Image (cartoon, rainbow, N blue to C red):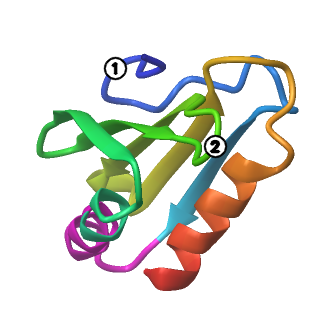
């Protein structure tokens, strides 16, 4: 797990298989709830942890079932939502994590 407390998600250790973004939103609570609804519906997703501010799931790839960690953190006092998607295996993800995060943002 890459959660380092209430302040922020952990930085990516390897840039070629991980993406960490921070979105400024006007309605943090509503955006967080919307995002959880969208992320929970991703195929092959298993939620591991969910609190008022933090959500963590494992999303598995279609063919080889490689596990990716998907984390969402809301930081209400800064009006920010952080999203981190990272492969647990391998050095490259062929852009899968970035595509996942971009897709979540476009659906929000």
Between disc 2 and disc 1, the foreground one is 2
Which quadrant of the figure contains the C terminus?
bottom left
Taking the spot 39% from the left edge, 30% from the top edge, the residue there is 7
**Residue 101 bears which disc, if any?**
none
Identify the residue position indicated by label 2 in the image: 63
Taking the spot 31% from the left edge, 28% from the top edge, the residue there is 6
> What secondary structure characterizes most of the magenta part?
helix
Count of residue discs: 2
Badge 1 crowding class, 10 Å Cα cut-off, few under 14, some 14 to 19, many 20 or more, is few
Residue furthest to the left: 52
Taking the spot 61% from the left edge, 59% from the top edge, the residue there is 100
Residue 55 in view in this figure? no
Badge 2 crowding class, 10 Å Cα cut-off, few under 14, some 14 to 19, many 20 or more, is few
Which quadrant of the figure contains the N terminus?
top left
Taking the spot 60% from the left edge, 29% from the top edge, the residue there is 66
Badge 1 marks a residue whose secondary structure is: loop
**Residue 5 bears which disc, if any?**
1
């Amino acid at each position: 797990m890459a959660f380092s407390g209430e302040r922020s998600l952990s930085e990516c250790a390897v840039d070629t298989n991980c993406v960490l973004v921070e979105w400024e939103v006007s309605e943090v609570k509503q955006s967080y709830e919307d995002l959880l609804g969208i992320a929970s519906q991703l195929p092959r997703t298993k939620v591991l942890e969910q609190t008022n501010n933090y959500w963590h799931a494992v999303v598995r790839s279609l063919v080889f079932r490689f596990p990716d960690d998907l984390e969402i953190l809301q930081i209400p006092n800064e009006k920010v939502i952080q999203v981190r998607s990272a492969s647990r295996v391998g050095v490259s993800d062929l852009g899968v994590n970035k595509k996942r995060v971009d897709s979540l943002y476009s659906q929000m």
